[in-house]
Image (cartoon, coloured by chain):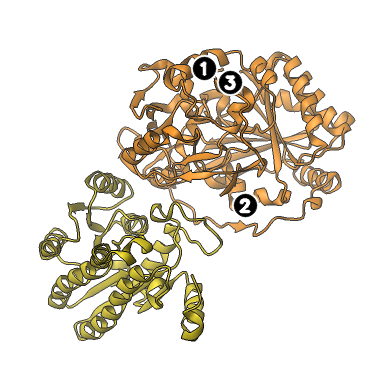
Amino acid sequence: MEIHGWGRYPTVNADIDEPVDALSLSQLLQVQDQQQPAIPRGAGRSYGDSALAERVISSRFLDHFVKFDDAAGEIVCASGVTLEQILQISVPKGWFLPVVPGTRFVTVGGAIASDVHGKNHHLDGCFSEFVKSIGVMLASGETVQCSHTRQKNLFRATCGGMGLTGVILQATLKLSRIESAFIKQTALPAANLDEIFTLFEENAHSKYSVAWLDCLAKGKNLGRSLLYLGEHATDNNLELQDSFSVSVPFHSPGFLLNKYSIGVFNSGYFNLNKRGNGDKQLHYENYFFPLDRIHHWNRLYGRKGFLQYQFVIPTETAKEGISSVLREVSNKGKGSFLTVLKKMGQQNKNFLSFPLDGYTLALDFKYEQSLLPLLDRLDEIVLAHDGKFYLAKDARMNEQTFKQAYPEWEKFMKVRNQVDPDDRFTSLQARRLGLVSAPNGDRHVQ
Amino acid sequence: MSSEAKKVFIVGATSAIAKETARVYARRGCDLYLVARNENQLKSLTDDLKVRGASRVSFSVADLNHFNQHAQLVGQAAEFLQGLDIALICHGSLPDQQASEKSFELAQHEINTNGLSVISMLTELAEVFINQRQGTIAVITSVAGDRGRQSNYVYGSAKAMVSTYLQGLRGRLLPFNVHVVDIRPGFVDSPMTARFKKGPLWSSPIKIAGIIVKSIERKRHTVYAPFYWGIIMFAVRIIPEFLFKRIKF
């Protein structure tokens, strides 16, 4: 079956295994002996090729809850459970996931493997900070429990490890107390990059913060943006929302998204909101997951798909690096429909986790051949500013760039060589980035 | 009945469709009693349903081809739940057609699993439901029972047997205020069909579960899941036999 990541690029023809429990997974790993290597796959929400291989192990049916302690705020579940399913159970009881990414349709296993971050990274860190323990089934079929204190190296390699250490079977997550299902949002406009950086620093105490940025604005308007701050409301309303959603039924013709339509949308959006719409109370779904209301929004980019490009640059050089990137994109006339800027906090100890103390920018581009040289150029700019790239979004970075951006890759490989010496878990991304013993195999990629 | 239904008995509870249906009832705070073969999966489903909101859940491990245990299983369920509002029969297997057309032993085993064991279970359930004079019995059959296709007729004939049985049972139980639903799913994307190539006609177990719950509430009789299988199977049924016998699907 042909599968792809959320960006719909690249695609691969894959055999899919769907184990229903630990036993069927271990049997699968045993017969897999003479077969191709496989990569674990959750909801398929990473953008590029990190959950792609000619053989994938889907966690679709590993989707059971084990225990919810609503006094202590701790939940135990299998790795295929989605964040949405957790929130539906925990919110009415006054508990929230301490870290949520931009969609609630990811699985717990995927969130750990990508060590996702949210709008509160500057204060609270990554998803793995709140993972109390995980059970990982290794290539040998043995299940190992690991945590921040137990089997530390396996834990640090697995959180952010893109599924390359084994199959995450189960996780124990810590939740945080909320008094309301609503978020108090404040929107602040910024006329340019200087202003938005100042606003981020001034509001560093704010629980949640993220900025939408008009990537086609040039000159003195470069970096004009809207900063959205959020705090949990305290109105004791813990009701779930009857989610209204629409679906994009088919691929939109790719040409609809071009620099003109994107320019009109971006400047229109900025001008509509630049007076700041002040304070507003939003349901958590609308604050954290606005795009979840449009199912299959990835189809808007047309049949060929799109690439997300997300990087982070340390605070000292962030402004300079980000403005170079924006100028380069703007000069090449490549529009990013949705551009997001965010201040991040301390780096954690995981070998391949993305965030570090600095600023991250995420851009998305419709896929076209001429895009690839631009992204290679952006890689150079980011590297020159000591930045790194988010593996959950990556589909094209080269091995050298990756190894320069992630100096701890060798520590990661040390663990990997212990737990998976025969490359039983391998993705297209891992081969491209040289995270396997036998990279660049002869397997065909479409 | 409808949304006040609180006591749900599910046979073949670890199948993908049954599991999702049980989760819908769990979210509504129902009590559930489950029967299936695999103890570990039953245990983990029990925990799962409790987290999702079920108030009381228990189970029995049983191989449903041991017909003589059926009375006891139904008795245990009725005792634990203190009566039954809904009984849902989901168990089944997908036979290897080519192997079972050559071996009667295999064919018999498949017909036992997909046909006779259901009828045995229905016999026991009918007694309980007649005595309590209310409730709904729902059975998952298949569109494969609508016509005997050469690629799948062992399975199809077992399912057809159950569907025909249900038609008669429905009439018999009507005076006792007991309703009977025959649910006929088409292609379902479940572990049972993991190795099949999927196309646009395939549905998720979650979708089928939603249809089952709604059909039970609305007291439907025969339900194609999703509805378009009703149209497809109508077309399949009206193909003249002289043509049909030449079609290899």
Residue A85 at what x, y percent from top left?
A: 43, 46
Q: Residues within 10 Å of mark 2 (few under 14, many from 20)?
A: some
Residue A88 at what x, y percent from top left?
Answer: 42, 47
Quarter of the figure with residue B25: bottom left
What SS does tag 3 mark?
Answer: loop
Chain drawn in yellow: B
Front tag of 1 and 3: 1
Q: Residue furthest front?
A: B102
The residue that disc 1 covers is A412
Dividing the picture into quadrants, the one containing residue A245 is bottom right
Mark 3 neighbour class, 10 Å CA radius: few under 14, some 14 to 19, many 20 or more: many
From the top left corner, tell me how far across and down residue A444 is, in percent: 64, 37
Q: Amino acid at mark 3?
A: Gly
Chain letter of the residue beneath label 2 in the structure image: A
Q: Amino acid at mark 2?
A: His
Q: Which mark is residue A296?
A: 2
Q: Are marks 1 and 3 in contact (CB under 8 Å)?
A: no
Q: Which mark is residue A30?
A: none
Q: Which amino acid, by three-letter code, is at mark 1?
A: Phe
Of all chains in the rendering, the one displayed in orange is A
On the image, the x and y values in percent for residue A356 come to 60, 19
State the mark number for residue A345. Answer: 3
